[in-house]
Image (cartoon, helix red, strand yellow):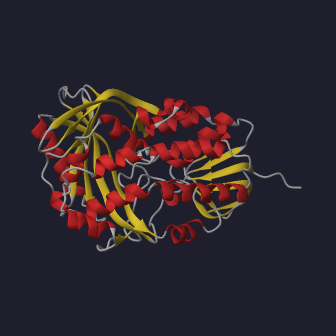
Amino acid sequence: MTTPDADVAILGGGLAGGLIALALHTRRPDLRLLLIERDDRLGGNHVWSFFATDLDAAGTALVEPLIAARWQGYTIRFPRYTRELGSAYNSVTSERFDAALRATLPAAAIRTGTEVRAATPTSVTLADGQVLQVGGVIDARGAAVLPHLTGGWQKFVGRMIRTARPHGLERPVVMDATVAQLDGYRFVYCLPFGPDRVFVEDTYYADEPALDVPVLRQRVADYCAAAGWEIAEVLGEETGVLPVVAGGDFAAFRAATDQGVAQAGIRAGLFQPLTSYSLPDAVRYALSIAGSANLSGTGLLAASRAWGEAHWRKSAFYRMLTAMLFGAAAPAERYRVLQRFYGLDSRLIERFYAGGTTMTDKLRILTGKPPVPISAAIRAITGGVPFAPLDHGAPAAGACA
C-alpha cells in the first residue's frame, strides 16, 4: 500500500489555513501536515486585529506567538462624541504570522510558491501536474465570489507609514467616523506600531465592490496631514474588498463552493456577517479541527459542513443588522447606526465582536430611539429591500478589524 504524502493537506497559507496548521501541529505533533501557499510568504499582506475578550484561554494560547503589537484600550470617534474604551486590543501582521509559522512547523510541512490546480477529499493536483495523495484536504484559499449570498462590501486601503517625527498616538483609533461620509459608511482606522510607525486604513461600507486605490491612498495622506503626521516613508500597503452578508441561500452557497472538499475561512462563510471580522471564527474552527477524531477527507468534509451550517444559524442576528445598515439608511447616514451602537455598554460591544451577543444584548441594540426610520428598517429585514448578490467583485481574504 502506498504511503500518503501527508496526513492532512491545507490549501492556502492565509489566516484560516495557517491557524489550522498551527492548531493541528500544536495539538497533534505526530501528524504529517502539508501547508500549500501560492505566494512566497504565508499570510499574504494583512493586518488582523482582535480584542482580548474575543478568545477563550485555548484560543489565546494558540495566537499568542502571532501577536505583533498589543494595547490596553482604544478610541472611537463619531460626530457626536469621542469615547475611550478599556478592552485590550491586539494585532497580528503578515510578517509575524509567516515567521511564527515557519518557526513552529517542520520545514517540510510548508510549501510556498506552489499553485494548486485541483483537489479532491484525498488528493491535491499542483499546477505542474504533480498529484499528492493525502489522508484529508482542507481548502482555505479564500474566495473570489460568494454565490447565492447577498449584502454589500467592506473595502479598504491601509498603509503602514513611518512618520518624520513621533506621531503621538498612544492607543488604536479603531473607528474615526468624523471624516467625510463618502461611498457609504466611511471611517479611518489607526494602529500605532511604534513612536514613528502607524498603520492608517481608509474603510468603507459600500454598495459596490469597486476600489479606487489611488483615491484612497490620497485620502490616507490627507488624513495624516490633518493629524499633523508628516509621512517620511510608506513601509507597506494592504487593500481588500470583503463581503458583508445580509442574507441568501446558505445550502446553495455551500453546494456551489465546497464541491465535496472541506472548506475554511471566507470561502466557508466563516466570518462575522456585519463586520467581516474573521479571526475569532478562524481560531475556533482551527481548534475544532485539531480536536476532531476523524481527519480523513470525508471526516473533514462532514465537520466543515456541520460547522458552517451552525455558524450560519448563529449569525442570523448579525445578518439582520447588515440588512438594516444597508437597506434602511441612506449611504451618507449609515454612520448614525454605528454611532448609536458604540454608545452602548462596553461589555455588550465586547460580546458583539466575539460573536456572543446575548438575547438581552439584542433587545438593547434594537430598542430605544432608532438611528434609521422604523418603516425603512422593517422593509429591510422583511425582504422589502433588494440587496446586491455577492457573486461579483474580488473579495480578499483577511480583515483589519
The residue shown at (21%, 60%) is 184
- Residue 94 lies, with reference to residue 3, above or below; the image says above
> In this orientation, which residue lies closer to the viewer: 5 or 363?
363
How many marks can you see?
0
Taking the image as shown, residue 158 lies to the left or right of residue 256, namely left
The quarter in which the N terminus is drawn is bottom right
x and y percentages locating residue 231 in the rendered image: 18, 37
Taking the image as shown, residue 18 lies to the left or right of residue 361, namely right
The residue shown at (26%, 40%) is 344
Query: Can residue 103 be seen at all in this image of the molecule?
Result: yes
The quarter in which the C terminus is drawn is top left
Taking the image as shown, residue 370 lies to the left or right of residue 86, namely left
Farthest residue in the right direction? 1
The residue shown at (64%, 46%) is 289
> In this orientation, which residue lies closer to the viewer: 361 or 144?
361
x and y percentages locating residue 38 in the rendered image: 54, 54
x and y percentages locating residue 134 in the rendered image: 74, 54
Query: Can residue 206 be seen at all in this image of the molecule?
Result: no
- Residue 337 lies, with reference to residue 145, above or below; the image says above
> In this orientation, which residue lies closer to the viewer: 322 or 144?
322
x and y percentages locating residue 399 in the rendered image: 38, 48
Quarter of the image for residue 392 reads bottom left
> In this orientation, which residue lies closer to the viewer: 13 or 76?
76
